[in-house]
Image (cartoon, rainbow, N blue to C red):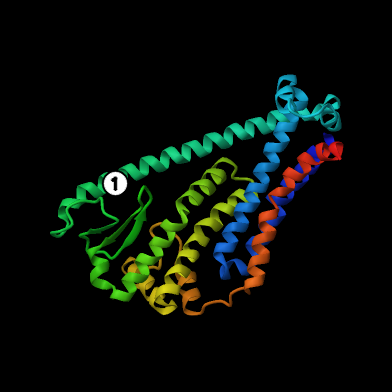
Amino acid sequence: MTVCLLLLSAVAVTAAVPVPRALTRAEWPEREPVVALWVWQCLVATVLLCCLTALTLGAAAVFHTVRTQVFAPAPTEVTEAYDLSAAPPWATALTLLLACGAAWTTAMLARELVDARRRRGQARAHLRERAPDLPAGLPSARGPLLVLEDEYPDAWWLPGHPPQLIVTTGALHRLTAHQLDAVLTHERGHARAHHDWLLHLSTALATGFPRIPLFSHFCDQTHRLVELAADDSASRRCGHLTTALALIELNQHRGVLSCASSHRLLGERVDRLLEPPPRLGRRHRALTTAVAGLVPLLPLLIAFAPGLSALS
């Protein structure tokens, strides 16, 4: 059991500190934002699984009741292989620390979800107040696309069931038909990929554990990569130049290229659309995706290794 805890701790520390720092310095995520988002999710899943399996093994070693429940269906040889009776003194402290971390993570996720639901409610109430000002034929804010009368060009999406796209009359007047199509495709890309859930998860983890490099980088990179992924969706349908011009037109009135949803400069996104970086090959993408998907299996292999060796 001691070896399992040490291996799980080593994997968690590796995935939480050096790997995310190296990933932020890499250039390929800019070319493949969807694959990069998948890699970040796999790293987070690896750390969380390491903590969860270590918590389970530690609690089974410290508390007899937990041990009985966890190893109830297992043969005696499997229980003896874990050597839970010889748990080191630091296992108790580690178990308590992991239990506190699990409780704190749950609290941060719950708080983020409650805050997100409250913000969505306020946004929908604000939309209902503005809905009577709509042109004839658009009397309510319940359709998939809502047009608001506003001189400033803007467009965004509101998560929900179903998600709702909002565009202002200023955007309709300022953008061409192709540019408007690019903007709406960008927002639909967010909705189809459920980027709001990724943003909630990354924000909750970064808020709860601000000093852990993985979670802080995960939050920053998620807010950046979801925009790049949505840009790619729009550029595949409408072209790179049209999408770049649509971003410029939507943000020119603010004086700087800024994005209302993430409060980040759009200069990098516009440059990327005007000079698309070379994409990874199909085999390279498939290999990266497969390897990243196998990484979260490491904690499970480590945790089940003593039991599998006992049965063999």
Q: Nearer the viewer, residue 176 or 219?
A: 176
The reply, left or right, for residue 241 in relation to residue 10 is left
Amino acid bearing label 1 = Arg
Quadrant (top left, top right, bottom left, bottom right) of the C terminus: top right
State whether residue 54 is above or below residue 199: above
Q: Is residue 94 visible?
A: no
The reply, left or right, for residue 246 in relation to residue 34 is left
- Report the residue that reaches farthest toward the top: 65
Q: Nearer the viewer, residue 308 or 200?
A: 308
Q: Nearer the viewer, residue 237 or 106?
A: 237
Where in the figure is residue 244, as x and y percent of width and height?
Answer: 41, 74
Q: Which residue is mark 1?
A: 124
Where in the figure is residue 19, as x and y percent of width and height?
Answer: 70, 56
Quadrant (top left, top right, bottom left, bottom right) of the N terminus: top right
Residue 100 occupies quadrant: top right
Where in the figure is residue 80, as x and y percent of width and height?
Answer: 86, 28
At 70% across and 54% down in the image, what residue appears? 294
State whether residue 94 is above or below residue 6: above
Q: Is residue 124 visible?
A: yes
Q: Residues within 10 Å of mark 1 (few under 14, many from 20)?
A: some
The reply, left or right, for residue 208 in relation to residue 247 is right
